[in-house]
Image (cartoon, rainbow, N blue to C red):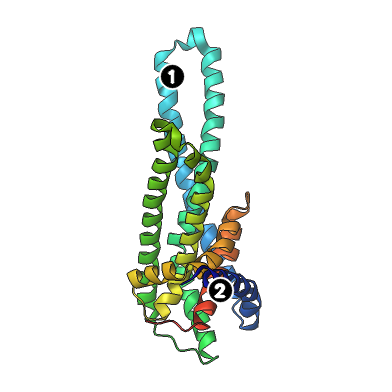
Amino acid sequence: MNTDSQFRHFIMSLRQYAGSFAFIRNNQLRHWYGIALVGTAATMFAVGKGLDAVSDSLRMWLMDGVALSLDESLFGWLVAGLEVTLDGGLWLLTVWLGFKLTKFVVLIVLSPVFALASDAVANALNSEKVVWHGLDWKQSLVRGMRSAILLVLLEMGLSSLLFLGCVVLPVFLPMLGFLTLLFPALSAVLSIWFYGAASLDYAWEKHGYGASDGLHASWKLRGVTLGIGLPFYAAMTIPVLAILAGPLFGGLVCVVAGLRVVSGMQIEH
């Protein structure tokens, strides 16, 4: 498929994303916003509790080490200063990990919500004479989570290779230093594509594709995949609000957009 077609598909996907808000409203699907919000809140609460427990255990372990190394009667002021610094550092680490984990929480933990929502969207599209070849809702749940885990692991692997090639390799081969400058852009494009592939997977499943066939279709239609993934990526990078914006305006709406795009295209199985 030529570059011009990919670009047209990219623009078409962005338009379908913009129109998905009205589609959700017109087909009485707005309650899925609430379902996704509740799922996100419950999951992030559990993640937060887990990170707090790990942070507290790490703090106690580090402070015990400091207490054993320093005589508190002589260096009490230093121990107190280290404790304050450690508390602040661990708090920042917890917040940072929370944001980093949001991506994987959205793609994996909320995949059952997106799978059920995709069934509702497919039913709405069926009323528009679109024929789907999907699984029952239980199989759809399993397929959604399995595919999400596969995509996350694949992205992590490719991101690691990209980091090694663009950041680590230039340390030993300085003439490749320009790759380090390209790393942020390449990393962003990779994430955008995987966000799009994760969203489109629900449409490929409804179209009768297996996980590997869906991945191949997402690569073949790179313009569509990037057009669906860009809003998802943008929603996930909003400071502080990404925890809510990502699942609602990224995950949920992008799944709807993916189904609408695929329903309007002639796809060869």
Front in this rendered view, residue 159 or 39: 159
Find residue 232 and report its image quarter.
bottom right
Provide residue 65's location: percent of width, then percent of height.
40, 21
Front in this rendered view, residue 215 or 99: 215
Front in this rendered view, residue 175 or 123: 175
Q: How many marks?
A: 2
Local SS, label 2:
helix
Vertical order, 118 against 133 (above or below)? above
Q: CA distance from mark 2 to mark 1?
A: 54 Å
**What amino acid type should be assigned to the residue bearing mark 2?**
Ala
The residue located at (61%, 77%) in the rendering is 24
Q: Is residue 74 visible?
A: yes
Where is mark 1, residue-wise?
66
Number of other residues with Cα within 10 Å of mark 1, as a class: few under 14, some 14 to 19, many 20 or more: some
**What amino acid type should be assigned to the residue bearing mark 1?**
Val
Q: Is residue 45 visible?
A: no
Provide residue 74's location: percent of width, then percent of height.
50, 7
Of the residues under marks 2 and 1, which one precedes in the sequence? 1
Vertical order, 222 against 85 (above or below)? below
Local SS, label 1:
helix
The residue located at (38%, 46%) in the rendering is 161
Provide residue 196's location: percent of width, then percent of height.
49, 65
The residue located at (39%, 85%) in the rendering is 133
Where is mark 2, residue-wise?
257
Numbered circle sitting on residue 241:
none
Left or right: residue 125 versus residue 148 is right
